[in-house]
Image: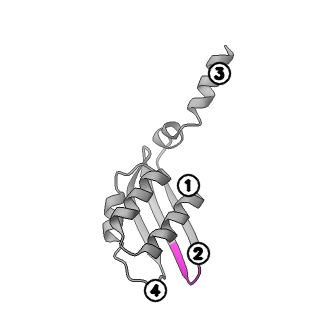
Amino acid sequence: MEGEVLKEAKAYEEWTWNYGKAPSFDLTLEGNSPGEFLKWICRRKKGRIQEAAINTDCIFTEDFHPLTEDLVGTPLTAKDIEEVLQKSLTNPDIIRDLRSLVREKL
């Protein structure tokens, strides 16, 4: 009996339960780094990002459109999102700031 309870409890700790089977929700990640504000809004369903938008007052120029498109279908995990950041963006400072925001908030 105890083994079954532990097995059941373990299942509720995993990503597939917490995000994959949880109801759809919107997630807003906000952060400040020196001289800039970042706000990232994700619409999530069945553990995967369905829609994303990024707002910033960053003085660096970066086209976030490829990132928001590439995030669609990505699992809502820091590791998967970081891979998309690296692939979709060119500015290392913005990549660093968004990676830091994801690691802190997820």
| Residue found 47% across the figure and 64% down from its top | 41
| Residue found 60% across the figure and 30% down from its top | 10
Which residue is denoted by mark 3 in the rendering?
A: 5
Q: Quadrant of the C terminus?
A: bottom right
User: In the image, which disc is placed on residue 106?
Assistant: 1
Which residue is denoted by mark 4 in the rendering?
A: 59
Q: Position of residue 54 (x, y in %)?
A: 43, 70
User: In the image, which disc is placed on residue 32?
Assistant: 2
In the image: residue 36, left or right of residue 61: right
Residue with the most extreme front position: 92
Amino acid type of the residue tagged 4 in the rendering: Ile
Question: What range is drawn magenta here?
Answer: 34-38
**Callout 4: SS:** loop
Amino acid type of the residue tagged 2 in the rendering: Asn
Amino acid type of the residue tagged 3 in the rendering: Val
The vertical placement of 73 against 20, above or below, is: below
Label 2 Cα neighbours within 10 Å, binned few <14 / some 14-19 / many ≥20: few
Q: Position of residue 90 (x, y in %)?
A: 36, 73
Q: What is the CA distance from the residue labelled 2 to the residue labelled 4?
A: 13 Å
Q: Give the mark nearest the N terminus, 3 or 4.
A: 3
Q: What is the CA distance from the residue labelled 3 to the residue labelled 2?
A: 42 Å
Q: What is the CA distance from the residue labelled 3 to the residue labelled 4?
A: 52 Å
